[in-house]
Amino acid sequence: MSLSIYRKYRPKTFDDLLGQPTIIQILKNAGRLNKIGHAYLLSGPRGTGKTTAARLIAKTANCETRRQNPKFQALGEPCNECRICREINEGRALDIVEIDAASNRGIDEIRNLKDATRVAPTSYLYKVFIIDEAHMLTKEAFNALLKTLEEPPSHVILIMATTEMDKIPGTIASRTQRFHFKRASVLQIIEKLKKIVEIEAIKIDNDAIELVAAAAEGSFRDAESLLEQMLNFGSPVGEEKISLRDVEQMIGKTGSAKVAAFAEKLLKKDIEGALNALNEIQEGGYNLAQFCKDLIHHLRRTLVLKLNPAMDSAFQNELAKNDLENLKKQTAYFQPEKHIQLLKNLINAYGQMRYSPFPVIPLEVAIAESLKL
Ligand SMILES: Nc1ncnc2c1ncn2[C@@H]1O[C@H](COP(=O)(O)OP(=O)(O)OP(=O)(O)O)[C@@H](O)[C@H]1O
Ligand SMILES: [Mg+2]
Ligand SMILES: [Zn+2]
């Protein structure tokens, strides 16, 4: 696997872009009807498909097959086979200019960009400028950009991408078509990882995939990078298959089963068992603050499900199936009037742990205090 996973598996069509159905539908319609806009602003958390979508817009706008074949145009997708699609996929299209605003923040760079927009594309229909990390531009740079956004030359498409929408001036945003990308759900990430694992014939246990997906915190790229890291690192036990334990070791985060088992001990007031398990987790070299955070999330979900069982549909996206089933079972032990205090104590402990040289102590104290009640 010479190409890194996240580059190799970057979606090549709108249909491959997971978890953003509304955005896909609007962009595909624009392609179908030949109504691709001149200025877009793509916002949302990291690793959710903004740069990918920008390149898809660039490809669809320019795809030769689409321009020559009305039947194909009706799909609203790029063909990925014509010369132009291939050039864009390989990152060697002269008329697609990607600018990293984090390192090109100033007015001079935007003036250069303006000059470049005046020059017609070399061989494409549209010249596409993708400004990544757009929130990093200076005030002066944004002002300089305003004019171009107001009256872009007809052969120009400007696409800005940002993780921090609130730092984009309203004057800029209002002159664009805006799309907000959603965080990926654990299930969507698992689905994509499973496909990659199958195609690449990677040997990895299911619970290991689930932990990789959960650790990515809503970013497809983070999940794919972590999977790749696991491949390079191999299994330290010398086994062929990557196991849950391998992933746990790599990221210092325990899998959901350990968190659930621990929560159950707390709910059943098994103080001895809880302290033993905590000791094991500490000895195992896991990040205790992370463990405490996972525990808080787990107990919070138990509380919510106890008070409102219909909320399980809201958790379906966040959790793997088994985890949700186990969570439901645990609500039997959850007594809101008692356990809300436990949750409060853990939240308190988490605040202290992150800055403490002895993170295990605030956690032990919180547990001891809560369970002796
Ligand atoms: N919606 C998605 N569906 C499938 N894969 C995705 C999606 N979003 C991201 N990926 C995967 O993550 C990689 C990075 O995606 P992309 O560069 O589009 O993220 P981004 O939103 O621009 O992130 P950043 O804000 O960090 O720049 C892609 O190459 C792809 O493998
Ligand atoms: Mg990006
Ligand atoms: Zn094409």
Image (tube, rainbow, N blue to C red):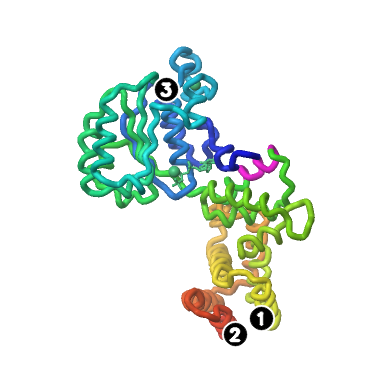
Whole-percent x, y for residue 244 in the image: 70, 58
- Earlier in the chain: of badge 2 and badge 1, it is 1
Q: Amino acid at mark 2?
A: Ala
Which tag is nearer the camera, tag 3 or tag 1?
3
Percent across and percent down for residue 157 are 33, 29
Q: Which picture quadrant has residue 303?
A: bottom right
Q: Which residue is mark 2?
A: 368
Q: Is tag 3's residue or tag 1's residue first in the polypeptide sequence?
A: 3
Q: Nearer the viewer, residue 352 or 23?
A: 352
Residue occupying image coordinates x 28% and y 23%: 154
Residue segment shown in magenta = 191-199
Q: CA distance from mark 2 to mark 1?
A: 9 Å
Residue where numbered disc 1 is placed:
275
Q: Which of the marked residues, 2 or 3, is nearer the chain's N terminus?
A: 3
Write down the quadrant of residue 35 in the picture: top left
Verify CB contact (< 8 Å) between mark 2 and mark 1.
yes
Residue at the location (49% across, 26% down)?
Answer: 87
User: Is the CB–ligand 1 distance for label 1 below 8 Å?
Assistant: no
Q: Amino acid at mark 3?
A: Asn
Q: Mark 3 near ligand 3 (CB under 8 Å)? A: yes
Specify the amino acid type for callout 1: Leu
Q: Secondary structure at mark 1?
A: helix
Question: Can you tell which mark lies on residue 62?
Answer: 3
Q: Residue at x 25, y 29 (%)?
A: 152
Of the two numbered discs 2 and 1 in the rendering, the one whose residue sits closer to the viewer: 1
- Does residue 247 lie above or below 77 as drawn? below
Looking at the rendering, the quadrant in which ligand 2 lies is top left
Determine whether the residue tagged by mark 2 lies in a helix, strand or loop: helix
Residue 197 seen in the current view: yes
Q: Is residue 23 left or right of residue 172?
A: right
Q: Secondary structure at mark 3?
A: helix
